[in-house]
Amino acid sequence: MEKRRIKIRIFLWTVLGFLIAWLLYQGIVPFGEISYTCDFSKPCYNIKKITPSDRVNSENNTQKILGNPVYFSLATPRSFNQANISLKYKNDNDLPIIEAGVLKDKLLWRYDLKPIRNKIIGQLALAWRVVTGKDNTILFQRNFVQADKDIKYYEAVDDFLNALPPFDEIAVYNYDLSYNYQMDNYKPEEERVELINNLRGDYQFYTYIKDEPLNFSFNFFDLNKNKDSDEIEIFVYYNSQIIESYYLNGADIKTGEALAIGNIDLNIADLPEGAYKIEVKASDDIITKEILTSQTKISFVNKIWLADDGRENFTLHTDSWTVNGQTTNPLKLQIIKIGDSELEIEETYKLFTVNSLRDVSEIILEKDDVIISGDGLFALAEDQLFNPIIKRVDNLDLNYEGINYVLANYSSPSEINNWQFADAKFDLSEAYREDGKYSFIISIPGLRADDLIDDNLVLSQIKVELKGRTLWQKINEILSRW
Amino acid sequence: MVNMDNLRIYLYEFFYVLAGAIAIFVLLEIVWPGVVLAYVNINWVLILWLIDGIFILLANRLK
């Protein structure tokens, strides 16, 4: 009897031992590669629920996405360097653009977006000349019959990169093309003037210099309305590379009393002529009280938030095709004039949108303390507005813009039995990870849950393949530190 | 005819291993969140353990 008891005991504890060893193996991922799949037939631990719930319906083991954007988290037992996300979806409404992205910066909610489907690129493959390069890079060139002038044709992608055509004839998609933007008839000014006062939170802008120093002085205040981190970082970029950075720290307290934090003076001489991007990273608790500069060309990228300063009938200029307005302040509900259109902000915290704008539009705000955002640039005066960004093939009319070349890194989704399959690779080494989770977005521009159109994207499966350091690489790394 | 002594041995040994499993799983979850819950639902292990405990009490009453 006792022998039998011991045999059973050894067997059961051995099974438990193997189970624990397998769990540890799945957690450590000693060979650095693991994959997780969720087909929505039951809740998945690693691939979390798609949110927010008002933009997603669960139906027949699928997730019907009704509004843009939606998010999901990926719980991983350890960090990884690379993720390959595969989606199985049905796009019965022919939604033109579907992208997936991983969160890189939580403060600014910035995602690294990769294509899942781009209808324009798919159509270009049928109508334009196609030259393929390395790593899915494709150069599309407008055909002679479609072009209103003779255009130069390139035989290889490298030829194109070595002798780029004029700036306004190029568009890119999922490709980081470095272009040395130069402006004709630019004259520098010496006098330093106040550009704007009372901007709230983070912002980025482009500026242009030629034979002059890059010259800005920022004065910051802390509203102390919340306990968020009150660090302020300023980065200066030239051709997508950081060339200078600055740092200032406020007190992470919540007293409701605004306090001055200090100044950041940015003065960099001997820089080459061109467009520079300045990024101010700060929480919504931070007010830029004043910006002084001698630069005359300044275009804010995608967003500008004028803080509450009692300003009325404030004018902005934009080249955005879509302009959004939002306010958190119930006293600032208003009708914004955008060119010939009107955008009524009738509720707080809700994003209101106006579409189909062309060229440069004037925006007149009845009151300040409203977040104005869009897919283009914003300036305080029409002569300050300039756009050094190479156009991106998303919400773009190639004929209207006179684009003759499109450089893309894209592969079309495959289709089996009416289901589309597409994947996107992400670099996770700089992705934001909190509580063991990476955050992902699925972006479908134009898809809205609150409109009367019955459109949606049906998602049937998400598969994530992860790659990272092996256990032996990790051990070597630890040993090399000693 | 079920051998009650054998059954009791099985029930006791299952009870011990399930108790050990719960303790180890909880400890692992505290040290490394998600490593167990990604694959094992500890609630079911706990329910199984409780059912086993109830059967042990019943088996002892029938002794």
Image (cartoon, helix red, strand yellow):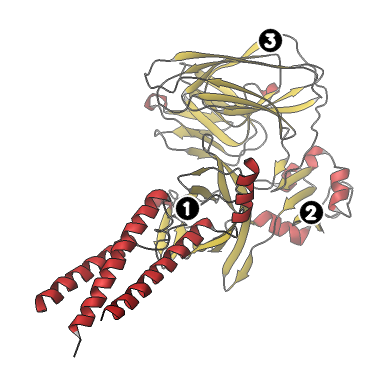
Determine which residue is flagged by label 3.
A192
Most distant residue in the bottom direction: B1
Q: Give the residue type at disc 2.
A: Phe
Q: Chain of mark 2?
A: A
Q: Secondary structure at mark 2?
A: strand
Residue A12 position, x and y percent, is 35, 72
**What's the distance in space between the residues labelled 1 and 2, CA to CA?**
39 Å
**B17 shown above or below A238:** below
Q: Give the residue type at disc 3.
A: Arg
**What's the distance in space between the residues labelled 3 and 2, CA to CA?**
45 Å
Crowd class of label 3 (few under 14; some 14 to 19; many from 20; radius 10 Å): some
Q: Chain of mark 1?
A: A
To the question of a shared chain for discs 3 and 1, the answer is yes
Which numbered dot is residue A75?
1
**A375 shown above or below A248:** below
Quadrant placement of the C terminus of chain A: top right
1 and 2 marks in contact (CB < 8 Å): no
**B17 shown above or below A479:** below
**Mark closest to the chain's N terminus, 1 or 2:** 1
Which numbered dot is residue A87?
none
**What's the distance in space between the residues labelled 3 and 1, CA to CA?**
51 Å
Most distant residue in the top direction: A191
**A370 shown above or below A220:** below
Determine which residue is flagged by label 2.
A140
